């Protein structure tokens, strides 16, 4: 109901454990209804296996979804999984600070692969035999501004690109100005060489005109907090929410 669905529809949707978990995993429940009530273009950067895009399309009807992924082990299955959705465009590239080609570090667990090299000390924080580098490949890079150059508005940018978030955001201007909200993975301890943590990203988002709206519970593996998902919304939208809920 907090997402804007009627009580009867909310109850029906919540009865499905699978649907409920997919919504929570995608962090769509952390977005304000002012965003989700009318979705135009949505970008799934770091689309992985396509779960976030499918969760989005299970709930809403965005005009266009751009799913961005470059991990060779994932791109083929991703295209197959999302082929039935006519509104989805799959881009085989890494979202990056500049256009061109770059070296992509492949981890044993594909979801951790990145343009940045993982720090040796972070390996012990995750499951054994998951964060070791098993190869390097050359991949196409694309900037966010170029990716959304033809989009009038981006309602949601989901940004899960394994440490490269700062470089992408610093080097984006026009694209971010047309973006209404961002769901972004933020880390509390360094994961990759030359990555940026939550404090630096939070400061940058404020400079770019976004405010923190919600923060998910952190992932911790019963030890230190490693990362969480942060939802940022344009300040002018947040101000409207403040006036609507004095």
Image (cartoon, grey):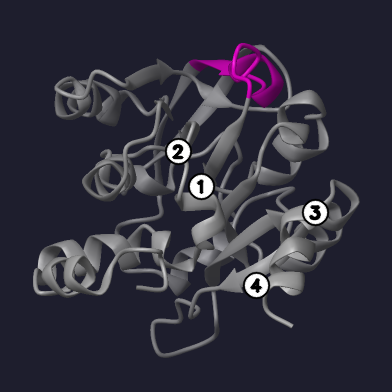
* First along the sequence among labels 4 and 1: 1
Q: Are marks 1 and 2 in contact (CB under 8 Å)?
A: yes
Q: Quadrant of the C terminus?
A: bottom right
For residue 236, which numbered disc appears in the image?
A: 3
Mark 3 against mark 2, which lies toward the viewer? 3
Q: Residue 188 — which label?
A: 4
Labels 3 and 2: the sequence-earlier one: 2
Q: Secondary structure at mark 2?
A: loop
Q: Which residues are magenta?
A: 139-152
Judge depth for marks 4 and 2 and give the one in front. Answer: 2
Q: Local crowd at mark 1 within 10 Å, few (<14), some, or many (≥20)?
A: many
Specify the farthest residue to the right.
Answer: 207
Q: Which residue is mark 2?
A: 46
Circles 4 and 1, Cβ within 8 Å, touching? The answer is no
x, y percent for residue 240: 74, 62
Earlier residue among tags 3 and 4: 4
Quarter holding the N terminus is bottom left
Residue indicated by mark 1: 160
56 in magenta: no
Q: What crowding class fits label 3: few (fewer than 14 Cα within 10 Å), some (14-19), or many (20 or more)?
A: few
Figure disc tally: 4
- Please tell me whether mark 1 sits on a helix, a strand or a loop: loop
Question: Which x, y percent locates residue 64?
Answer: 41, 24
């Amino acid at each position: 109901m907090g997402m804007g669905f009627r009580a009867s529809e909310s109850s029906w949707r919540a009865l499905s454990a699978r649907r409920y978990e997919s919504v929570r995993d995608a962090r769509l429940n952390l977005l304000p209804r002012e965003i989700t009530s009318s979705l135009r273009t949505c970008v799934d950067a770091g689309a992985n296996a396509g779960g976030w895009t499918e969760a989005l399309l299970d709930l809403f009807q965005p005009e266009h979804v751009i799913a961005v992924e470059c991990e060779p082990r994932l791109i083929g299955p991703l295209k197959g999984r999302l082929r039935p959705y006519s509104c989805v465009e799959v881009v085989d590239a890494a979202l990056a600070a500049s256009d061109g080609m770059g070296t992509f570090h492949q981890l044993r667990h594909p979801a951790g692969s990145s343009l940045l090299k993982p720090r040796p000390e972070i390996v012990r924080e995750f499951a054994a035999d998951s964060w070791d580098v098993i190869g390097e490949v050359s991949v196409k890079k694309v900037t966010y501004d170029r990716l959304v150059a033809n989009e009038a508005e981006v309602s949601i940018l989901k940004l899960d690109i394994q440490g490269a978030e700062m470089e992408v955001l610093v080097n984006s201007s026009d694209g971010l100005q047309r973006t209404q909200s961002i769901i972004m993975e933020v880390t509390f301890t360094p994961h990759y060489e030359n990555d940026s943590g939550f404090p630096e990203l939070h400061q940058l988002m404020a400079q770019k005109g976004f405010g923190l709206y919600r923060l998910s519970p952190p992932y911790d593996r019963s030890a230190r907090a490693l990362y969480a998902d942060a939802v940022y919304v344009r300040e002018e939208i947040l101000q409207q929410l403040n006036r609507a809920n004095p």
